[in-house]
Structures are given as structure tokens and as C-alpha cells.
Image (spheres, helix red, strand yellow):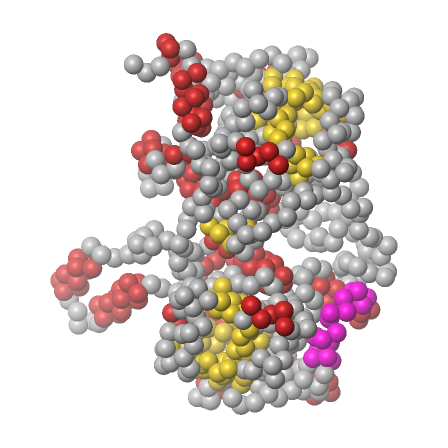
Amino acid sequence: MDPYKRIPERIVHARGASAKGFFEVTHDITHLTCADFLRAPGVQTPVIVRFSTVIHERGSPETIRDPRDVIHAFKPNPKSHIQEDWRILDFLSHHPESLNTMTFWLDDLGIPTDYRHMEGSSVNALTLINKDGKTHYVKFTWKPTCGVKCLLEDEAVKIGGTNHSHATQDLYDSIAAGNFPEWKLFFQVIDPDHEDRLDFDPLDGTMTWPEDVIPLQPLGRMVLNKNIDNFFAENEQLAFNPGLVVPGIYYSDDKMLQGRIFAYSDTQRHRLGPNYLQLPVDYFPSRQERFICRMVKMLSDPRVTHELRSVWISYWSQYRPSSAHNTPFWTTNSGAPIYNNNSSLTVGIRGPILLEDYHLVEKLANFDRERIPERVVHARGASAKGFFEVTHDISNLTCADFLRAPGVQTPVIVRFSTGNFDLVGNNFPVFFVRDGMKFPDMVHALKPNPKSHIQEDWRILDFFSHHPESLHMFTFLQDDVGVPQDYRHMDGFGVNTYTLINKAGKANYVKFHWKPTCGVKCLLEDEAIKIGGANHSHATKDLYDSIAAGNYPEWKLFIQIMDPDQEDKFDFDPLDVTKIWPEDILPLQPVGRLVLNKNIDNFFAENEQLAFCPAIIVPGIYYSDDKLLQTRIFSYADTQRHRLGPNYLQIPVNAPKCAHHNNHHDGFMNFMHRDEEVNYFPSRYDPSRHAAEFPIPPVKLTGRREKCLIEKENNFKQPGERYRSWPPERYIT
């Protein structure tokens, strides 16, 4: 028996059947969208379709409008694994918006006879965009040409009890007999300028759009005329994702859709791996690749001689597509074009990054999974334990509990790594790039050549020549301070800008600085080569031996504060990580001290499994719109889930030291004892409730969705000032 023949099943819709066919445009809608596959009547597109058993097979509204908790309520009791209606009724009683779905679910239309006699609805509202940029909200509806047929309870029990795969068999047999199922595609459109005229929110997935007000318009037809060749390859491995759109079709602000854009692709990466879109069933070949496939088929003719075959192979080998470059344009893994691979999608020029930036999430998620199982970056490192003690009162700036008063101590564990603190910070105050969209590219450029695995400077210089903001970082990296002597004699910088918030809700930007009490010491090249060659773990040994001898390393914590109302007074963007805040204008203020007075007990348990994440904050401290920080909020936690599993925060070294409660159940390496029957929220059977509200930044956001550079790049002033500040004898002559 092969234990690796099965992949994790789908979290929902596990049972299902697939078939192949085509979609054909029958009506012209080019005035509404520039989508290429809808460019004209008669255009056909090959399709593969998967049907699955859901609670509302027919085209109905969503159960709730926000994608949280609903699945737990519909699943069996987590204690007994018995399906119980009281859990469903309890959960939905807190969500009156679910009543619309209940009128479909509990109606006579709730159980389709089979897949061929079933309507389909996109449920979520998408956006159509034409060549002029005009947008319309759209909902899609599929109507079977053979009509809708449903089962009553007694019929469903009888048929399902006899053959629980009856719908799959009906679909397969119909196609095999030449009775090809067909659906007509209709759509409804709303001009966003007119949405306020309706008495409901058109982006609320729990509502249908009334057809008497917003009529169905014909668009095309779908015909399924071929059964799949292999159930596992073309059904179990089939992966759909509402995040995969094409130019001319975009998302809307539908809350359920926004959650699904991330959740579906994240689920597929967990279930099938980070390269799931390379699986043949999920991958659509390029025109060049289809050409080569046809040529290979021709050359397989037994009458083609070896000489003739060699001639043709030599012809096309000059032009065959490479896996890395089979189109001159950037695309997503699914082949959708990327018009901007440099900037994240934000609200306005400087607003927070949007979850709907599918390309950014895909890029970071793939990067997070490039290496298994060690860390993608900063793999070598050392850890130690100790405490942080507040020495100065900053309660006027933040309501963070661990900073509430001088003398308050908090136990800490710290990990140092080659070049960075994972607090998360850096031993330099700036970074190479300002937008996390470029982080995977940056790390790729700094790593060895992927072909030869040789470290080559030309790759580094090539990449950063396109990013002049990196020049400031190079004035630190290539300076005499570039190689710390050891961890104890190293500065630390938060690099990213965070936000402090006091009890009154007043927010201030903050940068954190760690200063070692024993001073900063660095190595020149010859010293680094000699020491590193003799013992590549010299910094780890120095830290361990110092603590063991009672010579406890200590750092003082300082902060710089900036009122957001004053940020426009500077000639640089204070949320740009490639810039420092001048200390003569924004002076360092003392806060506390960090003392490491205990070595770790086990290297694997307390260093290799140690997982930091800049998203983990406490009330009184919040994020800023720093573009690099915004991407790290997602990327670090995603990396830990890949490296250590979804329950990495249950590992003792990472687990919270305070009481905690949520409904994040099960998954790999779950070892928490749980015996409750309610794993959804809210519930009338569980007293758990919301925590007390705490302040978050009060700033109001306005702006368009944009992928753009910041306005105040000012890439050369600060690195130039730093270079000119060195003594004359250090200048290059």
C-alpha cells in the first residue's frame, strides 16, 4: 500500500465530479468588457468544470456576508463528530442575513436530481471593465438547457442510499452516450454610479439581484462533451480560485469575495503544494507550447526517420520556450498578465495594501515555500532568553500593557541571525527596497545563481541598478560597519515604522532602536575571513559563553516619535524604509533595557522552531502604511505556517504566555486538548464574547486602487550625506 497516493481532501465540497468541454460566446458584450475570451460571438474557449455537493446547489445567495465561522457550524460536532442541527440553528440565529439562503436550502429546490439539471450562480459580484475603463458590477447565472429538476427528501434518501455517486454516474454516462449537457450563461449588470438607488447593498452576497429590475442578459453557452481521463488527476487535483481573473474582469468589494481571493489559493497551496498551477489539469499551455505538442505528435509517426526527426528538432530547438521565459511579458502562475511587478496595490499612493492584490499574495506565498524545511532567509542563528524592563514612562504615547510603567519586566526570547534581528529588525537602520512586492526578487538576486548555485555579484548589481533606493543600504553594507564582530556588539533597528496609540486614541509613528551597552564592534574583510574560516559559529559561541559566564549582554531601547500630522514637513516619506529619521530633528528617547541572562535549553526546540512575525502586536501598538511592513504582516506568518505548520503558535517556544481562546481547530501538529462542542461564534451555548475594544489609528482612508511609486522617493540625498560625513581619509580617491 502506497501511503502517498492521497492528498489532503478539500475542506468543503469534498465530493464531486468533473468534465471537459467548451464555452462559446453567443452575444456581443464588448461595450462592457475587454476580456479577450469574450471578444466576439463565436469565440470558443476550452473549459473543465467541477460539480460538487454543497448545501445550496441551485443558484442561491450566500449564507452569510462575511467569511468567518460558518463552515465550523455546518461541520460535525468537534467533540463527537456527529452532525447536529442545533449547532447550525445556534450559529445562524446570530446571522439573520442567512434567512434568504434558508428559503432556497429548505425549499423543494434544495436537492438537485443530478448535476445536469442544476442551475449555477457566481453568487459574488465581480466587475466588468471595457477598453475605456468604464466599470459595471456583474453577476453570472448558468441555466441548464434540459431544465431544473429536484428531489424531495424521500426520493433523495432512496437514490442516495442506493448509489451515493448517482450524480457522478449520470454525468459520466450522459457524456459517454453523446447526450452532452449544456448550460446557457446569463449575466446581470449594475452601474456602480446607480447602486445607491437600490434598497439593498448589491455587493452583499446574501442578496439576489431582482430580475425584474436588473434583467438577465444572454452571453454564451457551455457544452460538456468529454469525460475526464483520470479521476485523481483531473478531479481531485483540480483547483479553482476566484482570484484568477483576466484583463476586463476584476473583483468587487464584496466582503465574501475579498476573503475568498486569498483563502482559495491558500487552501490549494496547502492541499496541492505551492506549484499547484503547474499541475497539467490546472495549467493552460501557451501558444508556443501547443505548437510543440502538435509537432511532437507529428514526429511520432513511425515512418518519420531518425534523420528527418533530427532536422526538425534542430529547427525548433532554437525557439523552444523555456520554463522561465516563454513569453516576453510578466504573468501570474495562471498566465494572467502583470502590468506592474514593482508596486503593491494600495488605497491611494500611500494607503494600506489590499488583500485583493492577488499577484502580491501569490508572489510572497510562493517565495515563502521555496525552501523546505529551513528558513528561506536568515537560516543560521542563535537564541537566548532574558527580560525586557521599562526604564522610562511613555504611557502618554501608548497604552501597551508591557510598557505601562517603569520597572515592569517582561520575559523574552531573542533570536539573532546572520545580518538581522528577527524581532523583526535589522542591524542597519534602512533596507534595500521600500515595497514588499520586490522582496522575493531582492532575495533571489542576493542568493546564488539558480543554474550553477554560485554566488555572483553581477546578479546583485543588475537587480539593484533598477532600484536606486537601495543606495542608502549599500552605504551601510559596504561600509566598515558591514560585518558585526558578534551578536553582543551589534546595534538593532526596527527599520519599519509602527504606530503607538495612547488610551485617548492619539497615534504617533514610532521607530525602535537597540543600542548594546558594550558598544558596537565590527570586522574588516581580512578579520572576518580569518575568524569565520576558523569557526563559522563564532558569534553563537561568543553569545553562549558570555551568558554562561554571567557576562549578560544588554541593550538599551530608544524610540523616535513623529506626529503623523507633521509628516508632510519632511523632504522624504517617513514610511519609506530606505530612509532614516534624522536624530537632530527627531531625537532618540529612552524606553527600557533588554538583558539576556539565560541560554536556551535545546537548540532545535528553542531556535529552529522559534517563529517571529511582525504582525503579532498588542493593544497600544499598531502597524503603519509602510509598504514593506504591510507585506511582512502576511509573509512572515505564511512562512511559519509552511515551515512549522498551521499550529506553529502551539509550539511551546512560540505559544502565548497569557490565556487565549479562539476557534482555530485541528490541522497538522495540533496537540491542544479541546473538548468543547461549539467551535463557531457567536453561540448561545458558549459564554465566549468579544474582548474590550481598544484604539487603532483613527486616520480616514480615501483613494483609488493604485500600483505606484511613492511621491517623495528622494533616493540620493541621505546616502550622499552619509558618504560625505565620513572622514576625508575614507573617501575613494
* Residue lying at 41% horizontally and 83% vertically, measured from the top left: 26
The residue nearer to you, when weighing 729 against 89, is: 729
Give above or below for 11 relative to 637: below
Quarter that holds the C terminus: top left
In this rendering, does residue 51 appear at all? no
* Residue lying at 66% horizontally and 39% vertically, measured from the top left: 622
Q: Magenta region, mostly helix, strand or loop?
A: helix
Whole-percent x, y for residue 357 in the image: 51, 54
Whole-percent x, y for residue 22 in the image: 42, 78
Magenta stretch: includes residue 97: yes
Quarter of image, res 684: bottom right
Specify whether 4 is left or right of 89.
left
The residue nearer to you, when weighing 523 against 480, is: 480
Q: How many marks?
A: 0
Whole-percent x, y for residue 273 in the image: 51, 54
Quarter of image, res 226: bottom left
Give above or below for 90 relative to 26: above
* Residue lying at 53% horizontally and 75% vertically, measured from the top left: 189
Magenta stretch in the rendered image: 90-106
The residue nearer to you, when weighing 457 against 617, is: 617
Specify whether 429 is left or right of 340.
right
Which residue is most to the top? 729
Quarter that holds the N terminus: bottom right
Magenta stretch: includes residue 279: no
Give above or below for 97 relative to 481: below
Quarter of image, res 390: top right
In this rendering, does residue 556 appear at all? yes
* Residue lying at 43% horizontally and 33% vertically, measured from the top left: 714
